[in-house]
Image: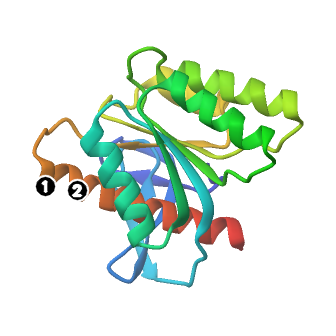
């Protein structure tokens, strides 16, 4: 999460900002609700080697993977359907000394939820002496105070709301916003 804060009309307070790319412009959005706070011109970015995702909805997994690769944000995407599969895939990558540049975790999944998976992931990183991989929680849950505290515990971590509308077109729109957010994060990290 960035140190920079701006006032968000939706949240009614100063909030940390994300930087996302959309329609050729670099936007600053609220970390908590995604509201656009500022717009600037886009810069070049490089694709991540690997992003690991976990979401129990097959449609969301397929859309995420397709858009991450299509928009050249990731060279490869490992998709899992729950936190337990995610932890296994993440651990396998670390054990093989293969890079993971970012993870995208749904908060509410069967078998193991996103918060528990993130907690186990951080322990696995500690066991391997690996750097902390940025986590992006992607869920329909509203970002309340408890979630804001979780984000700070798992730092570097951010949150993007995927909305509660089951309409695939709406989901594609939110995933496109997520991809823009990730592009912005990659640029910020490269700076």
- Relative placement, left or right, of 115 versus 138 is right
Q: Position of residue 19 (x, y in %)?
A: 50, 64
The foreground one among 12 and 175 is 175
Vertical comparison of 28 with 12: above or below: below
Q: The residue tagged with tag 2: helix, strand or loop? A: helix
Q: Which mark is residue 119?
A: none
Q: Residues within 10 Å of mark 2 (few under 14, many from 20)?
A: some
Q: Nearer the viewer, residue 128 or 164?
A: 128
Q: How is the image coloured?
A: rainbow
Q: Quadrant of residue 153?
A: top right
Give how far across and how far down residue 80 sits, in percent.
46, 36
Q: Residue furthest top?
A: 111
* Residue situated in front as seen by the camera: 132 or 49: 49
Give the left or right position of residue 23, taking residue 21 as reference: left
- Which residue: 49% across, 17% down? 112
The residue wearing badge 2 is 172
**What residue does disc 1 label?**
169
Disc 2 to disc 1: CB gap under 8 Å? yes
Which residue corresponds to the image point at 35% horizontal and 60% vertical from the top-left?
A: 66
Q: 10 Å neighbourhood of mark 1: few (<14), some, or many (≥20)? A: few
**Above or below 27: residue 24:** below
Find residue 6 and report its horizontal and vertical position in percent.
49, 56
* Residue at image point 35% right, 41% down: 11
Judging depth in this view, the residue of 70 and 15 nearest the camera is 70
Residue 8, position in %: x, y?
38, 51
Rendered residue at 71%/74% (across/down)? 191
Which element type, helix, strand or loop, lies under badge 1?
helix
Q: Is residue 19 above or below residue 35?
A: below
């Amino acid at each position: 999460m960035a140190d920079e804060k701006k006032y968000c009309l939706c949240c009614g307070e100063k909030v940390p900002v994300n930087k996302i790319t959309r329609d050729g412009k670099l936007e600053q959005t609220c970390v908590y609700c995604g509201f656009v706070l500022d717009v600037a011109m886009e810069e070049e970015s490089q694709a991540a080697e690997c992003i690991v995702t976990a979401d129990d909805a097959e449609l969301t997994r397929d859309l995420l993977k397709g858009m991450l690769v299509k928009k050249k944000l990731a060279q490869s995407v490992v998709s899992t359907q729950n936190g337990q599969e995610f932890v296994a895939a993440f651990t396998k990558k670390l054990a093989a000394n293969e890079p993971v540049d970012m993870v995208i975790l749904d908060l509410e999944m069967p078998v193991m939820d996103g918060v528990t998976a993130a907690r186990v992931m951080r322990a696995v990183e500690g066991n391997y002496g690996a750097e902390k991989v940025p986590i992006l929680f992607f869920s329909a849950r509203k970002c309340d105070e408890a979630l804001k505290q979780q984000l700070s515990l798992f730092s570097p971590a951010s949150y993007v709301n995927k909305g509660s509308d089951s309409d695939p077109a709406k989901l594609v729109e939110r995933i496109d916003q997520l991809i823009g957010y990730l592009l912005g994060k990659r640029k910020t990290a490269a700076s």
